[in-house]
Amino acid sequence: MGAACMKEQKSLVTNARTLRNNSTDAERLLWRYVRMSQLEGIKFRRQQVIEDYIVDFVSFAPKVIIELDGSQHRDNQQYDERRDACLRRNGFAVLRFWNNEVFENIDGVLALIRAHCLGQASPTP
């Protein structure tokens, strides 16, 4: 790994740490339900670096990523599509939820996450 690549990776890790310390309200709410392996014993981490991206939540076994999107993602659809494609190439299922879904239907969000983690849901496109 070259010096520039190592510097870039270190910057991503620093940014991930900052994001963990400044979670959105939706992230804090979901984290209450998935932290400490509360969801079917599955361990999730938040704000983790995978390749060139920082993901909101990830479980490495099973390989599931959860992204919570606010209104800024409406303008970044192409970026999100490239990012999701990269993450899927790494073997991850990527689940995206709007922040309002987390606030208004946390039980439904958790049911979808649970189904994906237990292999009971169809794979994401």
Image (cartoon, helix red, strand yellow):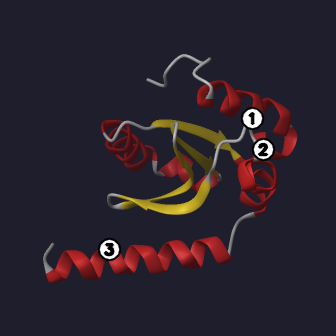
Structural distance between the alpha carbons of marks 1 and 2: 6 Å
Up/down of 99 relative to 53, above or below: above
Labelled pair 1, 2 in contact (Cβ < 8 Å): yes
Q: In this picture, is 121 found above or below 42?
A: above
Assign a secondary structure to mark 2. helix
Which quarter of the image is occupied by the N terminus? Answer: bottom left
Q: Secondary structure at mark 1?
A: helix
Quadrant placement of the C terminus: top left
Upstream in sequence: badge 1 or badge 3? 3
Q: Nearer the viewer, mark 2 or mark 3?
A: 3
Pointer 3: what residue?
9
Q: Which mark is residue 109?
A: 1
**Residue lying at 62% horizontally and 50% vertically, measured from the top left:** 69
Residue underneath mark 2: 102
Please say if 86 is above or below 123: below
Left or right: 71, with 84 as reference point: right
Give the x, y percent position of residue 79. Answer: 38, 50
Secondary structure at badge 3 equals helix
Query: Which amino acid lies under the numbered mark 3 shown in the image of this protein?
Result: Gln
Please indicate whether residue 72 sits to the left or right of residue 76 in the image: right
